[in-house]
Image: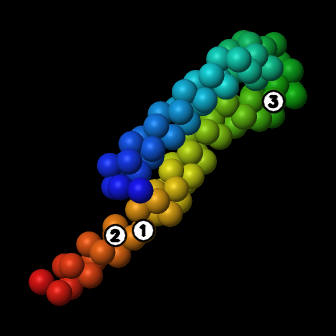
Amino acid sequence: MTFTTRLGLFLTIAIAGLVAWQWNSALDGSHDVTQLAVRQFHNDAAVPGQLAQASLAQQWWPLAWPLVLAMLGAVMFWDDLVRLWKMRESA
């Protein structure tokens, strides 16, 4: 597989992950942070915990996705990185 093919595949996977994150955020109505934030003003003691859990449920994608992309990039481009490193050492 050529470098440009791997780069195109990597970019396609990255864009698909971004679309999946947005799709998941739009379809998941069970974690409506806005409603929980409004309910917080009604002095309900359970709401702050629910609000924190809902916020984490919505925001796990930006926490995990860069790690997944870094691991995928390392696997896909490791040979190229080694070749570049050896070429710089010999120069």
Q: Front-most of 63 and 73?
A: 73
Secondary structure, mark 1, is helix
x then y, percent, for residue 40? 76, 19
Q: Front-most of 83 and 66?
A: 83
Q: Name the N-terminal-most of marks 3 and 2.
A: 3
x then y, percent, for residue 85? 27, 77
Q: Are marks 1 and 2 in contact (CB under 8 Å)?
A: yes
x then y, percent, for residue 37? 71, 18
Count of numbered badges drawn on the protein: 3
Secondary structure, mark 3, is helix
Q: Is residue 89 left or right of residue 10?
A: left
Residue that protrudes farthest toward the left in the picture:
91
Count residues near mark 1 (Cα–Cα under 10 Å), then give few for <14, some for 14-19, many for 20+: few
Q: Are marks 3 and 2 in contact (CB under 8 Å)?
A: no
Secondary structure, mark 2, is helix
Mark 1: which amino acid? Trp
Count residues near mark 2 (Cα–Cα under 10 Å), then give few for <14, some for 14-19, many for 20+: few
The image's mark for residue 91 is none
The image's mark for residue 50 is 3
x then y, percent, for residue 6? 41, 51
Per the model, the C-alpha gap separating discs 1 and 2 is 5 Å
The quadrant of the image that shows the N terminus is: bottom left
